[in-house]
Image: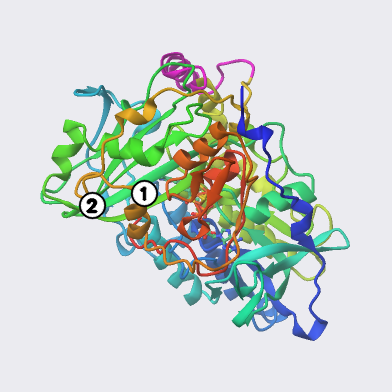
């Protein structure tokens, strides 16, 4: 049987590690360099700002730019996409009364919630499993929350550098020195165009990788410093839409079951979320594990199918889709964590480290907490007489994370994701026992399999996808348009894959990609990279996403 892992991308992590090459006086020097303006990176910048405010002598030693945050999106928030129901615990700890929850851009607290098991025409309300209870949590658009956090980070003294992709990890004498940013203004074959701008070396005392899911340099760093854990990371793909609606939704809704198939052989693990965004909007999305096997499965189209269910259709009646987006979620949890989250001069936090609680569909508060702890570790290593480059100097970060609620939460649910590889019913029963025993069951941990290692199968899955009507259901190209993606279409391809692959693999990629980047041809696959919304699914399923020119990709506002 064919599997995507048999056609690995022509990608070598070592090609993305380099020593600083700009002449000394042309390098941009910063104190702490944070890659990624997501909740992890921005929390790190805010916490550093607080600590440096109380230690002006250290701030002065860090030079003109004590803290910088690189972001590949057009602005902070442009590439942020989540549900999102946010557990406010880490935000409260971060701001310690400096900002109250009611000053943060939330749509409101979760007041009611319902969980349904769906069949094609019916919805059976079931009690919410303990991991899915959301009392005390708040609904947000992560893109909007990210913009607000970026303002707080700037107020705290950080310099934000949007439209800037970190492309290479700078390493010399065995320690991370910073990053090299990607060139801008190259043509399709790599030739410099009139507006060409070369990348630059940004060197720092500490580099914090907060790149989120499928972090490009995070993968490179795990390889370079030998940090990978025992189990491979696995992912799910989430595709979501934001709708303007006629009647307000008064609850958060989660669904399981249809349109996914329960049979163990399909390995279709996932469900949907529907969250209110104030009185006149809601967001709905479908999340599906990327260990699925059917060549014809398309999460984009499964979401379209979901909207035809009477329960969902009713909520959207008379409404209008206003935004669309897609992103992967690292799902391996505790079992897939790297064995160490630091290296000399380097820290890794948030989704890049895989800090997501899958049964709860939560990662934002772990990203924020890990970012804050990374800031504290970096700050400690910058004290007089210390040097962050010494091997082990940043190990306090791993220690602090292990003492935190993040570790405890993830440990308790560690075997849930692999349990669902055995099918919905068996997985559900095992998950119940795991919850009741607070993670003491099963006595031996389960194993994860790489998403790309699953043999493919083919059913006529695609027959059930509804035809796009442009009102309730949409095709992929109109979805890409609704993501705000305006990527220049004559830039070099940032997607690394084998082009000559069997039909099954080519069609798998064509269906899987929510943004219509791949097209199966007679000899393999054709690629339209400018459609890409950088969801990361291709990296899970046999290819490799690298960051395109800074400023490319979606321009999310409400996701
Ligand atoms: C569909 C979906 C639903 C979810 N629902 C919830 C929910 O309801 N509640 C919850 O708590 N969590 C939820 N999550 C998980 C949550 O969104 C993540 O755990 C969280 O966003 C992780 O934060 P982060 O800062 O680590 O990464 P991200 O939020 O991904 O941010 C990383 C940032 O780094 C930038 N970046 C990456 N690489 C580079 C580079 N090389 N150079 C420059 N910039 C770079 C990216 O553009 C991005 O802005 C959901 C996720 C998805 C996909
Ligand atoms: S090309 Fe890959 S990363 Fe880009 S949208 Fe498609 S699946 Fe996602």
Q: Which residues are magenta?
A: 420-444
Count how many numbered circles sit on residues in the image.
Answer: 2
For marks 2 and 1, the one nearer the N-term is: 2
Q: Where 485 sits versus 539, above or below? A: below
Magenta run includes residue 141: no
Left or right: 196 as drawn, with respect to 303: right
Q: Which mark is residue 476?
A: 1
Residue drawn where x is 52% and y is 72% of the image: 162
Of 211 and 390, which appears nearest the observer?
Answer: 211
Of 154 and 94, which appears nearest the observer?
Answer: 154
Residue drawn where x is 72% and y is 50% of the image: 11
Residue drawn where x is 66% and y is 84% of the image: 64
List the residue tagged with mark 2.
Answer: 243
Are the residues flagged by discs 2 and 1 in contact, CB closer than 8 Å? no
Give the mark toward the camera: 2 or 1. 1
Which quarter of the figure is the N terminus placed in? top right
Position in image of residue 249 (x %, y %):
17, 45
Query: Mark 2 to mark 1: distance in Å?
Result: 17 Å
Asked if one can make out residue 134 in the rendered structure from this viewpoint, the answer is no
Magenta run includes residue 434: yes
Which quarter of the figure is the C terminus placed in? bottom left
Position in image of residue 77 (x %, y %):
43, 63
Q: Quadrant of residue 15?
A: bottom right
Position in image of residue 52 (x %, y %):
61, 73
């Amino acid at each position: 049987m064919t599997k995507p892992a048999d056609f690995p991308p022509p990608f070598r992590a070592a090609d993305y590690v380099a020593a600083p090459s700009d002449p000394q006086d042309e390098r941009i020097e910063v104190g702490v360099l944070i890659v990624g303006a997501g909740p992890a990176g921005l929390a790190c910048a805010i916490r550093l700002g607080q600590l440096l405010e109380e230690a002006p002598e250290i701030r002065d030693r860090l030079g003109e730019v004590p803290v910088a945050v690189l972001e590949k999106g057009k602005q902070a928030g442009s590439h942020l996409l989540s549900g999102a129901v946010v557990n406010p615990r880490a935000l409260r700890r971060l701001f310690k009364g400096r900002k109250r929850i009611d000053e943060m851009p939330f749509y409101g607290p979760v007041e009611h919630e319902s969980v349904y098991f769906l069949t094609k025409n019916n919805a059976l309300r079931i009690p919410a499993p303990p991991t899915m209870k959301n009392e005390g949590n708040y609904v947000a658009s992560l893109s909007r929350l990210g913009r607000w956090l970026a303002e707080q980070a700037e107020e705290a003294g950080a310099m934000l550098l949007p439209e800037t992709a970190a492309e290479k990890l700078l390493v010399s004498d065995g320690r991370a020195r910073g990053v090299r940013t990607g060139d801008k203004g190259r043509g399709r074959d790599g030739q410099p165009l009139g507006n060409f701008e070369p990348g630059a070396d940004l060197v720092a005392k500490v580099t914090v990788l907060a790149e989120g899911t499928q972090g490009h340099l995070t993968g490179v760093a795990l390889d370079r410093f030998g940090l990978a854990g025992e189990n491979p990371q696995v992912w799910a793909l989430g595709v979501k839409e934001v709708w303007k609606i006629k009647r307000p939704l008064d609850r958060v809704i989660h669904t399981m079951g249809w349109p996914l198939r329960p049979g163990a052989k399909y390995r279709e693990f996932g469900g949907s979320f529907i969250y209110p965004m104030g009185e006149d909007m809601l967001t709905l999305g479908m999340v599906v594990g990327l260990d699925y096997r059917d060549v014809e499965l398309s999460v984009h189209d499964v979401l379209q199918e979901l909207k035809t269910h009477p329960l969902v259709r009713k909520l959207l009646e008379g409404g209008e889709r206003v935004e669309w987006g897609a992103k992967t979620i690292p799902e391996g949890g505790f079992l897939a964590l790297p064995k160490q989250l630091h290296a000399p001069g380097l820290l890794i936090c948030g989704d890049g480290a895989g800090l997501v609680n899958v049964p709860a569909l939560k990662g934002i508060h772990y990203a924020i907490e890990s970012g804050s702890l990374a800031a504290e570790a970096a700050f400690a290593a910058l004290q007089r007489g210390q040097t962050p480059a010494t091997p082990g100097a940043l190990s306090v970060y791993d220690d602090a994370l292990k003492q935190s609620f993040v570790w405890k939460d993830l440990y308790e649910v560690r075997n849930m994701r692999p349990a669902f590889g055995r099918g919905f019913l068996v997985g559900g029963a095992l998950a119940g026992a795991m919850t009741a025993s607070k993670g003491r069951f099963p006595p031996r941990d389960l194993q994860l399999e790489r998403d790309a290692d699953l043999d493919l199968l083919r059913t006529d899955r695609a027959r059930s996808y509804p035809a796009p009507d442009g009102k309730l259901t949409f095709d992929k190209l109109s979805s890409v348009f609704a993501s705000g993606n305006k990527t220049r279409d004559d830039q070099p391809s940032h997607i690394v894959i084998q082009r000559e692959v069997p039909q099954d693999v080519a069609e798998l990629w064509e269906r899987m990609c929510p943004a219509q980047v791949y097209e199966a041809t007679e000899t393999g696959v054709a690629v339209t990279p400018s459609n890409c919304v950088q969801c990361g699914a291709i990296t899970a399923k046999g290819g490799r996403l690298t960051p395109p020119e800074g400023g490319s990709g979606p321009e999310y506002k409400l996701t």
